[in-house]
Amino acid sequence: MKVLEIQGAYGLDNLKIAERPDPAPGPGQIVVAMKAVSLNYRDWITVSGVYGGSAPLPLVPFSDGAGVVEAVGAGVTRVKVGDKVTSNFFGATWIAGPPMPYKMAGALGGPNDGCAQQKMLISAEGVTKFPDHMTFIEAATLPCAALTAWRALLVDGGLKAGDVALMQGTGGVSIFALQIAKLMGLTTIITSSSDEKLERCKALGADHVINYKTTPEWGGEAKKITEGRGVDLVVEVGGSGTLMQSMRAVRQQGHIAIVGIVSGFGGEGLNMLPGMLIGNNARIQGLSVGSREHFEDMNRALTQHKTKPVVETVYPWTKAKEAFEDMQSGKHFGKIALTID
């Protein structure tokens, strides 16, 4: 079978198609014929070596993928041959309950081999059936970005209909958060530097939009939109570069869910953060995707509402480098995916 590997050293130029033996499932294992994978920011920083560049090479990247069960080992009852499934971000290690270090040890696409392979050997506990109304390409976007948004808003955030959620940018997590927020009856605010993208957000149901290029003090603008109260939750994808504006946007005892660091690791004004937290009684919480139980809950909601992921561009997996460069350009809206042949 063919796989996509990081070979020799980390870096986009070292992504190569390679041959490996076809796998056979042992007890409790299955083989999934993979059809598609999707790109996350985590995948880029993994391939480039910025994040966790200590995993032994060669490494198969991509945490998120979808395919069809091709073979099952002894004792497998969760799935059968022919079932359409996605990978779980943490494989078979985080099934339910709160996050713990040992539950996060199974993360795919680093340090463990990921989904960019024609035939993936995995524990039957490490996959989830995906909604029937989705294609393989659409389903491949769910395990990381969609589940991160779901957990931020509903599991950790505990939001209810009528609450206000603010999303930053128009990447995968933020667009999923917008879609999930609308199907759960939340009021939504979303930011972008592109008026064209903001119009697309309105088409997806965004109640309020802010161009952060023309309104750099967007935290204050969010306060105005909420008549001075502030938003109940911010889906914080920027990290230190946007955190101060998130603090200005959030209400007393509000919640900032830190899910990304796309603006980098440094930021001005962070020395003020402790005082602002005390004054605002706000809660800042980091989160890393979610459990299989969270995933199954989310899939039931997406099935009920027939929600379709927003996939901007699809590349063949032989064009993985070009797909990553597309992601880095920041021009995409929603998700980027690769097909596996």
Image: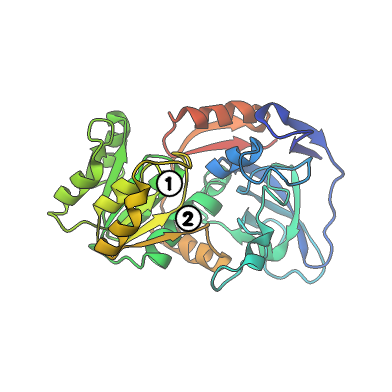
Q: Name the one closer to the observer, 237 or 205.
A: 237
- Give the secondary structure at mark 1: loop
In the rendered image, which quarter is residue 315 located in?
top right
Q: CA distance from mark 2 to mark 1?
A: 15 Å
> Which amino acid, by three-letter code, is at mark 2?
Thr
Task: From this view, report whether residue 74 is shown above or below residue 338.
Answer: below
In the rendered structure, the answer to whether residue 103 lies left or right of residue 30 reads: left
Residue corresponding to mark 2: 148
The N terminus appears in which quarter of the rendering?
top right
Measuring from the top left, give residue 172's x and y in whole percent.
45, 43
Measuring from the top left, give residue 254's x and y in whole percent.
29, 62
**Residue 205 visible at all:** no
**Residue 10 visible at all:** yes
In the rendered image, which quarter is residue 13 located in?
top right
Measuring from the top left, give residue 255's x and y in whole percent.
33, 61
Q: Residues within 10 Å of mark 2 (few under 14, many from 20)?
A: many
What is the count of numbered marks? 2
Q: Residues within 10 Å of mark 1 (few under 14, many from 20)?
A: some
The C terminus appears in which quarter of the rendering?
top right
Task: From this view, report whether residue 181 is shown above or below residue 203.
Answer: below
Mark drawn on residue 301: none
Residue extending farthest to the bottom is 97
Q: Name the one closer to the observer, 102 or 295.
A: 102
> Which amino acid, by three-letter code, is at mark 1?
Gly
Measuring from the top left, give residue 39's x and y in whole percent.
56, 40
Q: How is the image coloured?
A: rainbow
In the rendered structure, the answer to whether residue 338 lies left or right of residue 69 reads: left
